[in-house]
């Protein structure tokens, strides 16, 4: 049983962006708390701190990529909702119909 893949919407991109931002903020809080407490007690190494910072930065980069994808999706949706988008959609549908009639 195969399932059809759905095209991601702007809302799904923004939801993913919020998940990555939340994860990055959570990691920042843990980093600041563990860095302050662990640094005083000598329990956390510089390598651990560097690894957590790299992970946090990675989350922020993912969030930025999803934000950009959401904006691109919104821009495309707005175009297709305008009159030129409607005309282009109808023209492309006609071209596809002719192609399928020729190949059939």
Image (cartoon, grey):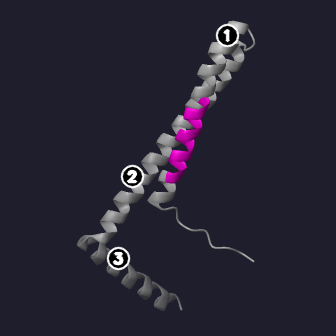
- Expressed as whole percent of the image width and height from the top left, the position of residue 17 reads 51, 46
Mark sitting earlier along the chain (3/2): 2
Distance CA(mark 3)–CA(mark 2): 21 Å
Dots 3 and 2: beta carbons under 8 Å? no
- Expressed as whole percent of the image width and height from the top left, the position of residue 44 reads 72, 15
Q: What element carries label 3?
A: helix
Q: What element carries label 2?
A: helix
Q: Residue 81 carries which label?
A: none
Q: Does the magenta stretch include residue 26?
A: yes
| Viewer-proximal residue among 9 and 32 | 32
Identify the residue at horizontal 73%, vertical 8% (top origin).
42
**Residue at numbered disc 1:** 39
Mark sitting earlier along the chain (1/3): 1
Distance CA(mark 1)–CA(mark 3): 61 Å
Residue projecting furthest to the left: 83
| Viewer-proximal residue among 27 and 78 | 27
Dividing the picture into quadrants, the one containing residue 57 is: top right
**Residue at numbered disc 2:** 71
Tell me where the magenta segment starts and ends, as one range: 15-27
- Expressed as whole percent of the image width and height from the top left, the position of residue 33 reads 62, 21
């Amino acid at each position: 049983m195969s399932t059809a893949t759905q095209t991601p919407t702007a809302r799904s991109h923004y939801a993913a962006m919020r998940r990555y931002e939340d994860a990055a903020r959570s990691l920042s809080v843990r980093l600041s708390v563990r860095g302050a407490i662990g640094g005083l007690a000598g329990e956390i190494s510089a390598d651990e701190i560097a690894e957590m910072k790299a992970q946090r930065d990675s989350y922020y980069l993912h969030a930025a990529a999803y934000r950009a994808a959401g904006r691109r999706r919104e821009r495309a949706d707005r175009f297709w909702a305008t009159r030129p988008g409607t005309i282009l959609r109808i023209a492309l549908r006609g071209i596809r119909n002719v192609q399928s009639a020729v190949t059939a």
